[in-house]
């Protein structure tokens, strides 16, 4: 049984080796694998040991992962982890407040298609400009901004500073055509308020409960981490 076990290990090692080989060196590696396999049959485990040595970096990665997991589940470290999480959330909250305060400075600025300056904004130009003032780079269109950051699947999980996206002129459309920044979240009513560049009124704050926006809501992305 021991011999069969060693042979099985050797076969697996050979298969993995062959799969990773380049075509040009296939024949040479095959011949070496055959030699190793033959050596194992004769009781020599050095070929297998050599393969284990060659895999040492992978083993180090595995050991590191185990150490991280052990740290996380150790009760003695839970307080440190909770404190770190709280610190991270506080930092994000401060960033969101700064972002929103910056955005609010532009209330009443007119909507101007294709522009991104205090003299006028379109929707994505506004978000791009406000985030830029916080040293965060966003792309220029609402559709491309919808691919940035991390998705927020549930409205109840939204946070201040998240980007929210809406369909275009067709109600219920899943095609992104408008973007704003969350200023307030009400998880109980699964609603939020957001500041954005409205075509009719320029920079203003609206509520997602308004029928116009509730039926056009597409999704959200979290840029601030």
Image (cartoon, rainbow, N blue to C red):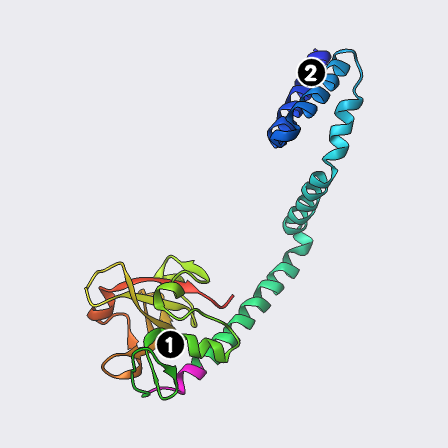
Position in image of residue 127 (x %, y %): 40, 75
Up-down relation of residue 221 to residue 47 (above or below):
below
Residue depicted at x 51% and y 75% = 95
Left or right of 197? Residue 148 is right
Residue 97 visible in the snapshot:
no
Position in image of residue 81 (x %, y %): 62, 59
Q: Quadrant of residue 32?
A: top right
Q: Residues within 10 Å of mark 2 (few under 14, many from 20)?
A: some
Q: Which residues are magenta?
A: 101-107
Q: Secondary structure at mark 2?
A: helix
Position in image of residue 83 (x %, y %): 62, 64
Say whether residue 104 is magenta: yes
As drawn, which residue projects farthest toward the front? Answer: 24
Circle 2 residue: 7
Residue depicted at x 75% and y 16% = 40
Q: Residues within 10 Å of mark 1 (few under 14, many from 20)?
A: many
Say which mark, if any, is on residue 65: none
Choose mark 1 or mark 2, whichever is in front: 1
Say whether residue 138 is magenta: no
Residue depicted at x 20% and y 69% = 211
**Which of the two discs, 1 and 2, labels the residue nearer the N terminus?**
2
Q: Quadrant of the N terminus?
A: top right
Position in image of residue 212 (x %, y %): 20, 70
Residue 198 or residue 84, whichever sits in front: 198
Say which mark, if any, is on residue 125: 1
Q: Are marks 1 and 2 in contact (CB under 8 Å)?
A: no
Residue 127 or residue 218, whichever sits in front: 127
Q: Gap in Å between the C-alphas at discs 1 and 2?
A: 65 Å
Residue 193 or residue 5, whichever sits in front: 5
């Amino acid at each position: 049984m021991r011999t069969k076990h060693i042979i099985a290990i050797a076969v697996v090692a050979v298969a993995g080796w062959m799969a990773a080989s380049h075509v040009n060196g296939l024949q040479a590696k095959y011949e070496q694998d055959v030699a190793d396999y033959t050596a194992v049959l004769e009781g020599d485990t050095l070929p297998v040991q050599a393969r284990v040595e060659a895999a040492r970096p992978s083993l180090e990665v595995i050991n590191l992962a185990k150490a991280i997991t052990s740290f996380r589940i150790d009760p003695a470290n839970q307080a440190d982890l909770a404190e770190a999480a709280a610190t991270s959330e506080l930092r994000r909250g401060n960033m969101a407040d700064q972002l929103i305060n910056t955005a609010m400075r532009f209330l009443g600025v007119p909507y101007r298609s294709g522009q991104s300056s205090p003299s006028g904004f379109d929707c994505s130009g506004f978000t791009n400009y406000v985030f830029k003032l916080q040293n965060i780079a966003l792309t220029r269109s609402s559709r491309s901004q919808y691919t940035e950051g991390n998705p927020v699947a549930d409205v109840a999980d939204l946070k201040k500073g998240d980007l929210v996206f809406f369909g275009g002129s067709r109600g219920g459309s899943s095609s992104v055509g408008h973007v704003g920044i969350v200023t307030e979240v009400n998880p109980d009513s699964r609603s939020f308020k957001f500041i954005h560049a409205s075509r009719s009124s320029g920079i203003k704050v609206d509520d997602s409960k308004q029928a116009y926006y509730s039926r056009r809501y597409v999704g959200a992305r979290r840029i601030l981490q």
